[in-house]
Image (spheres, rainbow, N blue to C red):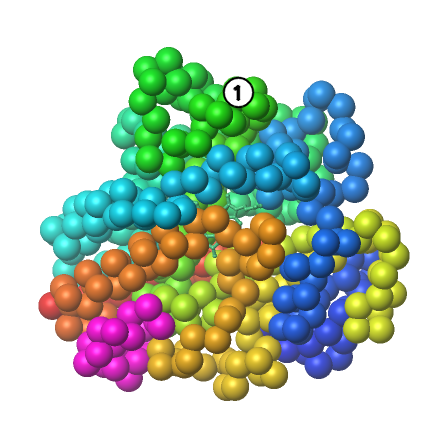
Amino acid sequence: MDIYAIYDEMRQQAPAWQAPWGDVYITKYDLVSSCLVNRQLSHVPPGEADADTQRSAVNDWLMYQEGRAHAAIRQALQQPFVGNGMAALAPVVAEAIDQLVTKADLSGTVDVVAAFTRAVPERVIGRLLGVPAEDMPMLHAWSAAIRTMLDTGFDEAFSSMPNATDAMSAYFTELLRGQLAAGEMPPLLVGLPALADAVGLTVAGRNIAFLAFAGHETTVHLLGNMLFHLAHAPAQWAALRADPHLVANAVAETLRLESPVQKICRWPLQPTALDGQPVDKEQMLVLLVGAANRDPAQFPQAQRFDVSRPGKQNLAFGRGAHVCIGKALAEMEGKRLLEAVLHRWKSIEPVPGGARWMNNSSIRGLDSLALRLVA
Ligand code: HEM
């Protein structure tokens, strides 16, 4: 199934398309962009704000908060990324890439997802959150479960029945308790003592679990998707080798063309209309970032992977009050990984049948990507 052909069809037929099951899908860049900053569209699924105490850990995720609760958690989580914060994170990124790419025993045909595009962001987030190495397989398993849960919809995510986020949150709450007792916070958790005081350990732990998931599951796919497109576009690869300054563009172009986060949901606080389509209060709006980023009205030859494309604003990290807090870290991982790959291999070539895309409507990425790596 070519999801992008479906997006194109929807954009041409009705940029705000009401599905028979009631949800409204938005595919046009301008519309998605304005919805992302529209304060009349809520981030909180209807009925969830006042749910009882049995509620799922997902209810407390930063992404589903509004107003003061959102501001308090966001301020704590974004502390490491502001000012000179990134300088402290850079050595962790460099070390992971050095170990898993530059110095790794890799030659011939390699599944790069298994070898390093998943392992690098996993290791980075693990180190930055202070997760012991022996616990990393649990993070890997939780992430796979949450990815699937986000694909199937909100019912399970917000259900009071236990799901993967509960076990993961309990783990991070305990980890945080130990870190607070030891008085030593890992780089991404410098703002957590104040947050734990303000909202309690449980909500803080739930948000570290969210940070652990959001902070690597997305970047994994940026790296894999980027190598997929470069392997299939030898002229673009050659352009990068000739001019390494294009590395940042290659990252931005991958985020545009193959956005790891494909959709973002919102719920109107009042009845409204989008592109002439009436939308009820609380009717689910599905903002298709993956479609907006391929809107030909915004990006000429939108289906083409072009590392020299002028860096027009794409929506891969969202916009507005909830814009991604980890953008700089994800971009750093993308750039450093690409530099290491360009340095180590003369060419990266696709092998027949070597790419297996995930079957997931929320997250776009590869389960495996076999490439011939030529030194
Ligand atoms: C290529 C990698 C990434 C992509 C494509 C991505 C994408 C996004 C998008 C689209 C949103 C907005 C969601 C919304 O408006 O509802 C978001 C929010 C968020 N992202 Fe990222 N992200 C990436 C990497 C990261 C990293 C590395 C971190 C942290 C280490 C991170 C942490 C977060 C958090 C905490 C939020 C919630 C912000 C809020 O609700 O205020 N992300 N991300």
Please provide the residue range marked out in magenta.
Answer: 230-250
Residue 59, image quadrant: top right
Nearest the viewer among 190 and 306 is 190
Task: Answer yes or no: is residue 156 visible.
Answer: no
State the image coordinates of residue 164 (x, y, percent, origin top left): 54, 31
Q: Is residue 40 above or below residue 298?
A: above
Nearest the viewer among 70 and 166 is 70
Residue shown at the point (51%, 39%) measured from the top left: 75
Judged left or right of residue 62, residue 260 is left
Task: Work out which quarter of the rendered image holds the N terminus and state it.
Answer: bottom right
State the image coordinates of residue 144 (x, y, percent, origin top left): 47, 42
Task: Work out which quarter of the rendered image holds the C terminus and state it.
Answer: bottom left
The prevailing secondary structure element of the residues shown in magenta is helix
Q: Residue furthest top?
A: 181
Query: Ligand 1 near label 1 (Cβ, under 8 Å)?
Result: no
Residue shown at the point (33%, 68%) measured from the top left: 248
State the image coordinates of residue 86 (x, y, percent, origin top left): 32, 48
Q: Is residue 136 above or below residue 272?
A: above
Judged left or right of residue 71, residue 227 is left
Residue shown at the point (51%, 62%) measured from the top left: 316
Total numbered labels placed on residues in the image: 1
Q: Amino acid at mark 1?
A: Asp
Q: Residue furthest front?
A: 83
Which residue is denoted by mark 1 in the rendering?
197
Q: Does the segment drawn in magenta span residue 339? A: no
